[in-house]
Amino acid sequence: MTDATAPRGLKALQHSPAVFLMVLAFVNWLGFASWTALLNNFAKEAAGFSGQDIGILQSVREIPGFLAFTAIVLFWFMREQILAYLSLLALGVGVAITGFYPSLGGLLLTTTIMSLGFHYYETSQQSLQLQLLPKAQAPRLLGRIAGASALAQLLAFGSIAVIWRVFQPGFVSVFLTAGLLTIALTLATWLAFPRFQGAVPQNKGFVLRRRYWLYYALTFMSGARRQIFMAFGGFLLVERFGYDVSATATLLLATYGINTFMGPVLGGLVGRLGERATIRIENISLIAVFVGYALASHGHFAGWGVAVAGALFVVDGVFFTLTLAQRTYFQKIADPADIAPTSAVAFTINHIAAVFLPVTFGLLWIKDPAIVFYIGAGIATISLALAFLVPRHPAPGAETVLQPLLPAPAE
């Protein structure tokens, strides 16, 4: 590349919506992954958490997700892009101060700040993705964005695993460094990229349409089963199998090392197989993972329990990428003007179960951890049944396979 072409190449990257979304995803997951890698061990070792405590914390963490519909009000005053930047700054602040508060009350406070940033960012970026990416290329480009997210997590988990094993730092310094880095990268991104705007002006009110009912249902079930994994999958490894910070970070490192390459591959798979088949594959894999967790918690794999539980953790982390099929399904059936408000509403629907499920299941965990994972398998089975209602070629007027049998719904 010559000096004359270099600036044009850099300018092209700066004006690419896909590159912009990849950078945002990288910054977001660098911060959140650092928090995730440390949380279970920090909660157990520094704050003395029980299974019930971790359930309470995870329920509180999801309250901002449940309130994500309020982003619609914020969209009246600011663009999605500005909200994304402000949200990432809040995420960085929450991560940075976490290590200073090793108690239930302190973690509830810092987690709320971190979670407000994370969830409002997620609402903004889902809206931006569906507005800025062309339908024909969306699965492939979303796969690349997932790969960028995985790369950020790979760097976070890898760095923490190495630093913890070699230098044995305290929780305070690692949380602080990760948070400040997230803030610095957010400000750099804000300065580097121009304004991006979707082609269709977005509806400003709250949008709930009957013809989107299957998307809402899939979103609700996805949120419910994901929270079981988020709240209790990693905690099982720590409590029952004795994973320390280095081992947990190494396992996450393996997961997102695979996802760095598999994200684009799985995005291409959605494009080739279609949303219906992809959602089925995702849920079949999750049923197997949850049943495997339940058996491992009872010691059914004898001396292999530690390895089996770790492998199931990795499998779940890899196949989670396939949830992008739900987004491309919605993109194909939606009125383009509904994308921003529906993204906010759908994110709230995704978190309805997340508010009460972790704390409720924390009580079940005390009785028997396997019950939690068997319920997760049941939720994934319901989601699999819903996947059979997704048309092979979704479009407005063909939102479900039942559409030809039903009268046209009122908006």
Image: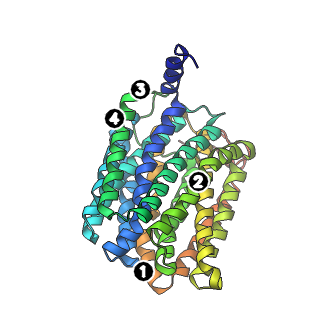
Q: Nearer the viewer, mark 2 or mark 3?
A: 2
**CA neighbours of label 2 inside 10 A, class few (<14), some (14 to 19), many (20+):** many
Helix, strand or loop at disc 4?
loop
How far is mark 2 from mark 4, CA to CA?
39 Å
Instruction: Tell me the tag on residue 139.
Output: none
Q: Nearer the viewer, mark 2 or mark 1?
A: 2
How far is mark 4 from mark 1, CA to CA?
41 Å
**CA neighbours of label 3 inside 10 A, class few (<14), some (14 to 19), many (20+):** few
Q: Nearer the viewer, residue 156 or 278?
A: 156
Q: Give the percent coordinates (x, y) of residue 103.
A: 27, 71
Instruction: Tell me the tag on residue 363.
Output: 1
Q: Amino acid at mark 3?
A: Arg
Q: Nearer the viewer, mark 4 or mark 1?
A: 1
- Residue 396 visible here: no
Q: Give the percent coordinates (x, y) of residue 214.
A: 60, 52
Instruction: Tell me the tag on residue 257.
Output: 2
Q: Which residue is mark 4?
A: 76
Q: Nearer the viewer, residue 161 or 371?
A: 161
Residue at the image position 27 percent from the left and 57 percent from the top: 97
